[in-house]
Amino acid sequence: MKRLSALLLAASLWGASSYAGGDSHNQHAAVFTGVTVASGHAGFTLGADYEYMPDAWGKTYGLIGIVDFVLGKPTQSILAVGGTWHPMDALRVVLAPGVEMAGGHSAGLLRIGTNYDFHFDTCSVSPTLNLDIVGGHIATVIGVAFGMGF
């Protein structure tokens, strides 16, 4: 677990150029910490995401890769790849199909989420709310992401 935490922290701090409102970054990496609540149970959640916004799409649309780990019995792993929409510069909406793996089983997942970036020079702090839909059940994921644009 310590290695995973160190890896996620390193990924969030990696990046070069300036990131503040109006700058020309088209990539963003972040680490996430929060809680996942499903069926009356809550689990501490760690994760990371990487977003790429192709120049041709402007700063309105992007692609995202997501990895989350919900710590509990059993530990759940979530992998998703999807799209992002930025109706405003700091607001992001996510729609990402993926897979949830736990206890030797896997199931299809759809993540619907949003976050708002507060920019501090090259870094961002983002309150985040996600809904994971798995087999007709909905899990709520809430927390904060710490990221960097480059």
Image (cartoon, helix red, strand yellow):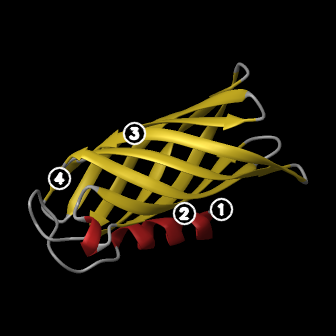
| Mark 1 or 3, closer to the camera | 3
Q: Which residue is mark 3?
A: 114
Cα–Cα gap, marks 2 and 4: 23 Å
State which tag comes first along the sequence, 1 or 4.
1
| Mark 1 or 4, closer to the camera | 4
For the point 39% across and 39% down, the residue is 114
Residue 44 in percent (x, y) is at 61, 40
Residue placed farthest to the top in the image?
A: 40
| Above or below: residue 38 compared with residue 53 | above
Decide if residue 41 is in sight here. Answer: yes
Residue placed farthest to the front in the image?
A: 56
Residue 64 in percent (x, y) is at 46, 61
Q: Which residue is mark 4?
A: 119
Instruction: Check if mark 2's residue and mark 1's residue have beta carbons within 8 Å.
Output: yes
State which tag comes first along the sequence, 1 or 3.
1
Q: Quadrant of the N terminus?
A: bottom right
| Mark 3 or 4, closer to the camera | 3
Looking at the rendered structure, the secondary structure element under dot 1 is loop
Q: State the mark number for residue 5.
A: 2
Looking at the rendered structure, the secondary structure element under dot 2 is helix
Identify residue type, mark 2. Answer: Ser
Identify residue type, mark 4. Answer: His
Residue 45 in percent (x, y) is at 59, 44
Residue 92 in percent (x, y) is at 33, 46
Q: Which residue is mark 1?
A: 1
